[in-house]
Amino acid sequence: MNTVAGAFAVSSPREHDIGVTALQRQEELNRFLAGVERRALRYAEIAIRDRDDAMDIVQEAMIKLARNYAGKPSEQWAPLFYRILQNRIRDWHRRQAVRNRVMVWFGRNDPDDDYDPVAAAPDPLARRPEDELGTDRALAELSVALERLPPRQREAFMLRTFEGLDVAGTATAMGVSEGSVKTHYSRAVHRLRDALGEHYGE
Amino acid sequence: MANDNDDKLVRQAKALFDESVDALDGATLSKLNRARQRALEELDEGHPAGLRTWLLPAGGAAAVAALAFLVVGTNDTDMRVPAGVTAADSDFEMLIDENSLEMLEELEFYAWLELDEVNDAGHSG
């Protein structure tokens, strides 16, 4: 009797448990990605100054995290995600450097070729320009100052300050030692202070 | 005093960043949502990731070979190159500079990643 009943079972208890665990994992990863995606986009946008490319980079980082690290403990996801994101940003800068060289070599480097009037149209849901002016100006000053930092200092500052990673998490994300993170971060803060002035932030 | 100023700067920078995050428009948030759903599909699909990571260096090597052919091959022809621009030199310098060492480190990272996946597959299978 039990044998007959077992023959009609759709899945074993173990398979059921695995299915539930996978579903929980998916929900957990969804929560994690939903929690970091907006900050990651702005992080990438500041690093490369292009919204569309930043979106592509964030999507690639999310896909790679899901594909390769979903099985890791969730507390490791943040530094792994930002490590992937950081590597993608570095790759983007390398590709841009090569692309610019090649375009100059062939005598073509016209930014108007990429102009998209639809993408450039104002967003009705966006905040009014006058509301954003003060924030935009201050953020623009900060972005320029960040851009002038050596890459490692910029990464350490942005990961620690903007993304809230601790020293160990930042070290994992950057692929360097914790001591290096402290050094890069400290130098970044001093350079930003010099660049933005003593009264920035008051 | 310097520490106080540094703390203020860090707080101000974080506040600006947070504000810019909150100001993201609806279209961008929608794109992010779609990107996230696309990433979560990876969990269902069970991709043969090992094959792709194996192809990655091969693809990179092919790209480098194509670039080398383009640069070296076209130097043999009579193409007009702007004065002062030596693409071959500059590109190869870029390939052997400090950044390329980082690229090699990343290749080690990818290799570690592939090994990690193989081990994971071994444990689960």
Image (spheres, coloured by chain):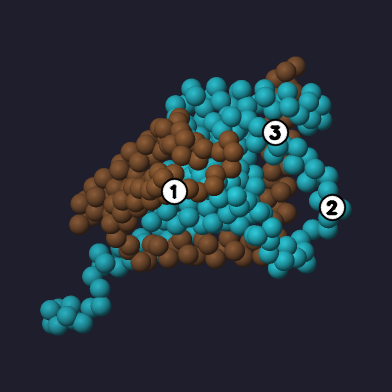
Chain colours: A cyan, B brown
Q: Chain for mark 3?
A: A
Q: Amino acid at mark 2?
A: Asp
Answer with left or right where residue B33 lies relative to residue B14: left
**Residue A145 - label:** 3
Marks 3 and 1 sit apart, C-alpha to C-alpha, by 44 Å
Image-quadrant location for residue A14: bottom left
Q: Nearer the viewer, mark 3 or mark 1?
A: 1
Q: Pointer 3: residues within 10 angstroms few (<14), some, or many (20+)?
A: some
Q: Is residue A121 visible?
A: yes
List the residue tagged with mark 1: B77
For the residue pair B72 and B36, the one nearer the viewer reads as B72
Q: Pointer 2: residues within 10 angstroms few (<14), some, or many (20+)?
A: few
**Residue B117 - label:** none
Q: Amino acid at mark 3?
A: Ala
Answer with left or right where residue B59 lies relative to residue B35: left
- Secondary structure under tag 1 reads loop
- Residue A94 drawn above or below residue A15: above
Q: Amino acid at mark 1?
A: Thr
**Residue A131 - label:** 2
Q: Position of residue B80 (x, y in %)?
A: 54, 47
Task: State the quadrant of the N terminus of chain A.
Answer: bottom left
- Residue B66 drawn above or below residue A17: above
Q: Is residue A39 visible?
A: no
